[in-house]
């Protein structure tokens, strides 16, 4: 057996949910969750799910393909401290911008409707394309 196959052997608790990479000796936090579509389940009834890091997900998915096992690959949600907050305008600023937009639409809107309405009443039509 070569060294890669030795490193690919799972730890004893690899089938249960864990917060480390499926491959033993890997200290990188997992980024991918691989859910197998096999009929077997974990003892608690949850689907067979393995977590792996960016370095090993290609290895485990190729092993599953070689074995003929179907799987679904999902990115693991980041921890709240790792997530960047989506900046959002304060409510007052959003209301002010919405109000200005409505006022401008109410000022300009009737003139646009009247312009095209008068043109339509007097029979204006766009030129026909040749």
Image (tube, rainbow, N blue to C red):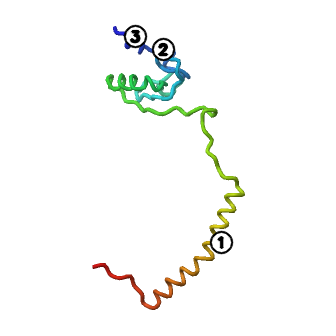
Rendered location of residue 24, percent (x, y): 48, 14
* Distance from Cα at disc 3 to Cα at disc 2: 10 Å
* Residue projecting furthest to the left: 130
Q: Earlier in the sequence, mark 3 or mark 2?
A: 3
Mark 3 crowdedness (10 Å alpha carbons): few <14, some 14-19, many ≥20:
few
Give the quadrant of residue 62. top left
The percent coordinates of residue 91 (x first, y second) are 70, 55
How far across and down, in percent of the image, does residue 12 sit? 49, 12
Residue beneath the point at 39% across and 22% down: 59
Few, some or many residues within 10 Å of mark 1 (<14, 14–19, 20+): few
Residue placed under numbered mark 3 in the picture: 6
Name the N-terminal-most of marks 3 and 1: 3
* Residue at image point 72% right, 57% down: 92
Please state, as top left, top right, bottom left or bottom right, where the C terminus lies in the image. bottom left
Residue 118, given in percent of the width and then of the height, sits at 50, 88
Residues at marks 1 and 2 touching, judged by CB atoms closer than 8 Å = no
Local SS, label 1: helix
Report, in whole angstroms, how far the alpha carbon at label 3 lies from the one at label 1.
70 Å
> In the displayed structure, would residue 113 be above or below residue 9?
below
Residue found at the very far top of the displayed protein:
1
Q: Secondary structure at mark 3?
A: helix
Give the left or right position of residue 94, taking residue 8 as reference: right
Specify the quadrant that holds the N terminus.
Answer: top left
Seen in the image, is 38 located left or right of residue 90? left
Closer to the eye: label 1 or 2: 1
Give the mark toward the camera: 3 or 1: 1
Residue at 53%, 18% (x, y): give it. 27
Asked if labels 2 and 3 touch by Cβ distance under 8 angstroms, the answer is: no
What residue does disc 2 label?
A: 24
* Mark sitting on residue 117: none
Q: Which residue is mark 1?
A: 103
């Amino acid at each position: 057996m070569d060294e890669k196959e030795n490193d690919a052997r799972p730890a004893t608790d690899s089938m249960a949910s864990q917060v480390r990479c499926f491959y033993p000796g890997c200290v990188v936090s997992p980024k991918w969750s691989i859910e197998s579509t096999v009929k077997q389940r974990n003892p608690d009834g949850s689907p067979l799910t393995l977590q792996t890091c960016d370095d090993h997900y290609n290895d485990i998915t190729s092993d599953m393909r070689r074995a003929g096992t179907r799987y679904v690959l999902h990115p693991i949600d980041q921890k709240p401290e790792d997530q960047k907050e989506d900046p959002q305008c304060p409510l007052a600023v959003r209301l002010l911008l919405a109000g200005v937009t409505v006022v401008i639409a109410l000022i300009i809107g009737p003139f646009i409707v009247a312009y095209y309405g008068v043109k339509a009443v007097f029979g204006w039509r766009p030129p026909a394309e040749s």
